[in-house]
Image (cartoon, rainbow, N blue to C red):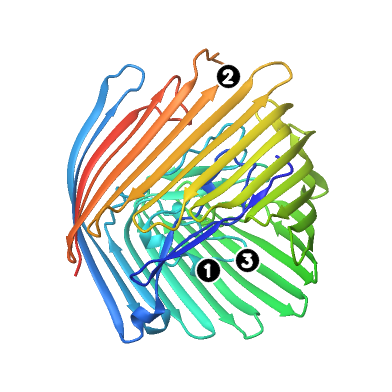
Amino acid sequence: MSGSAEVGLLVEQETTSGRKARYSSAPIDTRLPCFECQFPAITVEASQDEMKDKEAEVQWLPYTIGFSEERWDPFTGEAISETTNFDVGLDVSAKFRGGNTAALTINPDFSDIESDRFVSSINRRFAATYTEHRPFFTREAGVFQDPLGLVYTRAIRNPNVGVQVVRRTATSSRAFLLADDETTTYRELGSSSSYEVTMPTRSWNLVYRSIESREDGSSWGTFATARTTDGYTNVVAAMDGRWTSGAHSLMGEVVGTHSTVSLEAQNASATGYGGFISHRYAKGSYESVTSATSFSDEFRPDLSSGVRVGTQATSHASTWTVVQSQGPQYQFGISSDGTFDGSTLLDGEVGVSAGAGLTNGMTLTGSIGGMTSRVGGKLLDGKLALITVDGTIGPYLLVAGSMGIGSTPDYDVGVDGRAKQASLLLALQGFETVDASFSATHDSLRLPAGGGYTIRTVTFKAGLHPTEHQHIALLVNGARFDDYRDLTTPRTEPDDLVQYQFRYTYEPARFTRLILGVSSSGISGFGINGIAMTKRLIFSKIVVAF
């Protein structure tokens, strides 16, 4: 949708034990129906003072887990399966002087990890991405980042074994990740759409990243991924760099991919390429960013979250900031972008925005934009007026919200419809014993000939630390679909999805941790996003640390 707003949040809390909890988010794209789905995982970093007198700190975490699971048909109520199982695994992590780290996981268990937020696939052309919550992958996630975002660790769906090593010096870093995955998950990419595929074949996945930095802020790096499974290999190699000179900074990346299929019925290979370049100019109150990307038809990065292959894209954004010694700070901006397949325009967008940083810590932004998308061989236009607000109210409450109205194409039907959207996030901060957040979204589309859809989602998350040995976590996700247009089956009742997760952790001593949890998801109506059953999971996990 056009005129999308970008809202960034950053909350940092340092506890009395010297550990730093950092809650951060990249800019949030309000075009997506799930507001909070775009939040990255919380990372906890050890203070450098903890390591100054130690050569190394190694933690061994063997665990045992027992769980029971029931599955039944949501429409008939008949039981489908009931399973009781017992498993063991091991996690090892090590920290060394200089910020060097290493980690090993064997038969990892993620049953006590926070569940994914709900993301709808309705009127979505590209496969949805999900936040990474698994500690093995989030521990050093920032080291593996590159300008094109070629590492999406959620593509490693069910690892059996994982190894991660990161080595740092004052001017460089090198990182290595190897994982044996029970399945093979990738994105089938196109110029105007993408979808996710999971095959029940075991795969080995490798990621390597190196960065060399200079005192002036410039850097250059290399990047590689490799995946191999039965009869198939995918290799990605890239180089990237950042150069800074005065008010100018230039960032770029070139990447090549090579895929090989060697099966009895098929032998083929394909080589693709891609590139990205961005120029930033900042001087005084003015800042501009201009970027361009290009990807060939054969470009295939298996471990990425997906790009638009066979396309070329350009974008530009300019902002002017007015700073006053007293009173609000104002910002004005213009932006435009376009995606092409050769000389054919696939998508385009232009927008203008204005914002004010108020003296009470709140930021208010308004934007108006227009867009066009090629659907079924014809261009459909859309527009959106959007208002966003974010900031803190008092010392403990963080707020972010948006409200928009306009029009957007329905990509399934190929017509333009009237759209409304709204989102709200409330989060507590600054407390040692409790944290909580609440988010809600509303997204609707009405078609000229009738029909359309309305999607509402709610997420509530809370954590309570009654004592230093106990932690209680609760997560509730809800979604409701009203008036959903189905071309084959009319729907007279709304579809509901409810998911909850409760987790109790008791750590009576330094070396033992007991985790008890219950999670459940339920659905009514005709089924949403391919969900054909309701499942309930009850698990008990014991971790011994030494």
* Residue at 78% from the left image edge and 64% from the top image edge: 288
Residue 210 in view (yes/no)? yes
- State left or right for residue 107 relative to residue 74: left
Residue 249, disc: none
Report which residue position mark 3 lands on: 255
**Nearer the viewer's eye, disc 2 or disc 3?**
2
* Residue at 72% from the left image edge and 27% from the top image edge: 418
Secondary structure at numbered mark 1: strand
* Residue at 34% from the left image edge and 43% from the top image edge: 474
- State left or right for residue 118 relative to residue 113: right
* Residue 23 in the image, given as x and y percentages of width and height: 48, 59
**2 and 3 marks in contact (CB < 8 Å):** no
Secondary structure at numbered mark 3: strand
Report which residue position mark 2 lands on: 483
User: 542 above or below 235?
Assistant: above
User: 121 above or below 55?
Assistant: above
- State left or right for residue 311 relative to residue 98: right
Q: Which circle's residue, 2 or 3, is located before the other in the chain?
A: 3
Determine which quarter of the picture holds residue 329: bottom right
Report which residue position mark 1 lands on: 224
- Along the line of sight, the residue nearer the viewer: 451 or 471: 471
Q: Disc 1 and disc 3: Cα gap in Å?
A: 9 Å
